[in-house]
């Protein structure tokens, strides 16, 4: 198989509209790939901070493209890169105003994350996206994958209003990156930042990540 260099992969991403040149936040005192990555909520992240590649995924639970990225790419990313210590994956909430229930879904998922239940709730929200988008029943969708006790805690957190400031922090960070659509993935490696806009296949992404790891 012909090996594709990093420049070739970047050009491929540009050609299909996935890569956009946008500025990263100012670099901080963090080492290696963590340079410029701020406001990390560990409840919203998977993997090890020491990973050579950091990926921030700005996502909206009511966005069909975000569902596609989550189900077709991100879970393979977790299995092959996050769980092997190569990538630190950060979920960023970026609910779009055009979606009636996306902020509600983000509140529930964020609250579940505080209990260590982000992944089952995120999976339930994405897999049942069309149902709760039509009915507005985010609460019932989340309740289907949590115990009664867990759901009581999630509802209390949502009702308490403490999730919105956390969501707003992610949204503000997205404006710094000039995020204007979801999903947008910001990849950090070797003091460089690579914004990838839209849905990218795992086959394309893993080639890019392998080149960045060298």
Image (cartoon, rainbow, N blue to C red):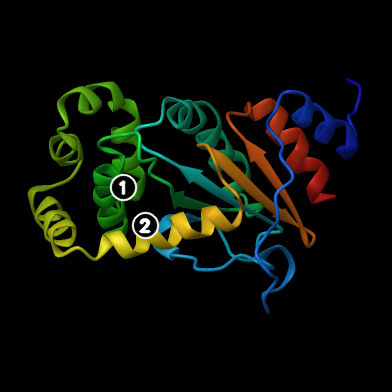
Q: Residue at x 60, y 43 (%)?
A: 185
Give the image location of residue 123, x and y in percent. Answer: 34, 35
At mark 2, the secondary structure is helix
Whether residue 65 is visible to the viewer of this picture, yes or no, is yes
Give the image location of residue 17, x and y in percent. Answer: 70, 28
Vertical side of 3 occupied by 193: above or below = below
Q: Quadrant of the N terminus?
A: top right
Give the image location of residue 149, x and y in percent. Answer: 9, 55
Q: Nearer the viewer, residue 56 or 18?
A: 18
Is disc 2 in contact with disc 1, using a CB cutoff of under 8 Å?
yes
Q: Residue at x 58, y 39 (%)?
A: 77
Q: Nearer the viewer, residue 7 or 77?
A: 7
2 or 1: tag closer to the N-terminus: 1
Compute the Cα span from label 2 to label 1: 7 Å
Q: Is residue 185 left or right of residue 42?
A: right
Q: Residue at x 27, y 42 (%)?
A: 105
Whether residue 83 is visible to the viewer of this picture, yes or no, is no
At mark 1, the secondary structure is helix
Give the image location of residue 101, x and y in percent. Answer: 25, 37
Q: Is residue 187 left or right of residue 7?
A: left
Q: Is residue 125 left or right of residue 7?
A: left
Quadrant housing residue 98: top left
Q: Quick one: label 1, few (<14), some, or many (20+) residues within 10 Å?
A: many
Report which residue position mark 2 lands on.
167
**Residue 106 tag number:** 1
């Amino acid at each position: 198989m012909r090996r594709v260099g990093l420049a070739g992969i970047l050009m491929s991403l540009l050609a299909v509209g996935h890569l956009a040149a946008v500025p990263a936040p100012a670099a901080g005192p963090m080492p290696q790939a963590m340079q410029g990555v701020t406001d990390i909520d560990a409840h919203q992240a998977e993997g090890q901070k020491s990973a050579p590649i950091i990926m921030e995924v700005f996502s909206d639970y009511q966005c069909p493209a975000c569902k596609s990225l989550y189900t077709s790419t991100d879970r393979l990313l977790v299995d092959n890169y996050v769980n092997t210590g190569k990538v630190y994956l950060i979920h960023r909430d970026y609910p779009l105003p055009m979606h009636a229930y996306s902020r509600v879904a983000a509140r529930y998922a964020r609250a579940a994350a505080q209990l260590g239940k982000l992944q089952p709730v995120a999976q339930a929200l994405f897999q049942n996206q069309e149902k709760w988008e039509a009915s507005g029943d985010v609460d019932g969708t989340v309740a289907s994958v949590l115990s009664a006790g867990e759901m009581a805690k999630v509802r209390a957190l949502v009702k308490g209003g403490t999730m919105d400031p956390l969501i707003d922090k992610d949204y503000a960070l997205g404006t710094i990156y000039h995020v204007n659509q979801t999903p947008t993935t910001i990849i950090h490696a070797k003091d460089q930042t690579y914004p990838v806009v839209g849905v990218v296949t795992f086959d394309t992404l893993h080639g890019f990540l392998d080149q960045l790891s060298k």
